[in-house]
Amino acid sequence: MSEPDGRPGPGQQPYQYSPWQPPVPPKRSSATATGLIAGSVVVVVVMTLAFLAWGYPGFLRTPDVDAGGAFWPAQTSSRPPASSSPASSSPVSAAPGTASAIPGERAPMPKRPRPLADPVTCAFTPDPGSPAPKKATLPPDGPAPSTGTVGAQLATTAGDIGLTLDRSLAPCTVVNFLSLARQGFYDGTSCHRLSVLTGLQMFQCGDPVGDGTGGPGYTIRDEVFPELTYGRGVLAMAKTNAPDSGGSQFFLVFGETNIPPEYTVFGSIDDPGLDVLDKVARGGIDPAKPGIGDGSGPPKVPVTLTHVTS
């Protein structure tokens, strides 16, 4: 115990203090070390900005065309062969606010790696949960040929669009389209959805309601395969995100369209028809009408199917 004056008490060792050392001046950083530190700071800043620009949704970036949602040609309900020569039209620029120009050359049509059995058996499923707003009779179930082509013509208010329906790609879908056309189901319906976005350049038609929610009151099976592609000149079926949910809606591809092979391709579009689609695409989206939130929407150039013949 220490004495009151701070001296060590009996049996205690005197306090020991470390010898005094003069202060050491800080080392100067070399020019090389300073350069390395500054370079590291620059790298960190650049990487942070890159992350914000490309890795953080909505910051300095338009949304990707994502096949997981409505960016695909999806319905919005609860949820002789064409020539491979270049199209007669020249490339057209996309409407203001879109991401890319529309190509002028048609894409090669997809082909099945192995032919289907001939005939195939078709079946069509009534959908009581989604009644048809326009009367449609189900096509007959049963055999359908899987070889040959059928011509069809879309007479529209913007011009005629010629189609070649290919039974070797989707025989039951061809049966369905011909059945609806011959019933007059498509007559008077409007094409409700145009997209000129990078990765999704297509025009969607076939909805009797005119907003993406309608159908014929039944569904058809998907006729897809992994090698499917969707380039300029392709005719394909729209559907919801669920499999085998197509009905009457279809889409006409006039440009680059990068989507998974989940949409049935059942024909091609002739060159005059592509000219019509290019004219509609040049007009762009009508901002005065509601879209579906993915950059697509009703076209400024309105298009109504006046009559479909085959």
Image (cartoon, rainbow, N blue to C red):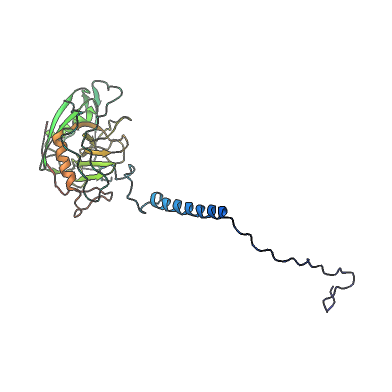
Hey, which residue is sitting farthest front in the picture?
31
- Give me the residue at 82% from left, 67% from top: 16
Please say whether residue 136 is visible from this viewpoint.
no
Give the total number of marks visible in the rendering: 0
Horizontally, is 117 left or right of 88 in the view? right
Rendered image quadrant of residue 155: top left
Classify the position of the N terminus by image quarter.
bottom right
Q: Residue 176 in the image: state x and y as whole percent.
A: 19, 32
Please say whether residue 307 is visible from this viewpoint.
yes
* Closest to the observer, 208 or 272: 272
* Closest to the observer, 43 or 156: 43
Hey, which residue is sitting farthest bottom in the picture?
5
Residue 75 against residue 144 in the figure, above or below: below
Q: Residue 201 in the image: state x and y as whole percent.
A: 24, 41
Hey, which residue is sitting farthest right in the picture?
10
Rendered image quadrant of residue 199: top left
Q: Residue 111 in the image: state x and y as whole percent.
A: 27, 26
Classify the position of the C terminus by image quarter.
top left
- Give me the residue at 13% from left, 35% from top: 272
Rendered image quadrant of residue 114: top left
* Closest to the observer, 147 or 42: 42
Q: Residue 278 in the image: state x and y as whole percent.
A: 17, 41
* Closest to the observer, 294 or 100: 100
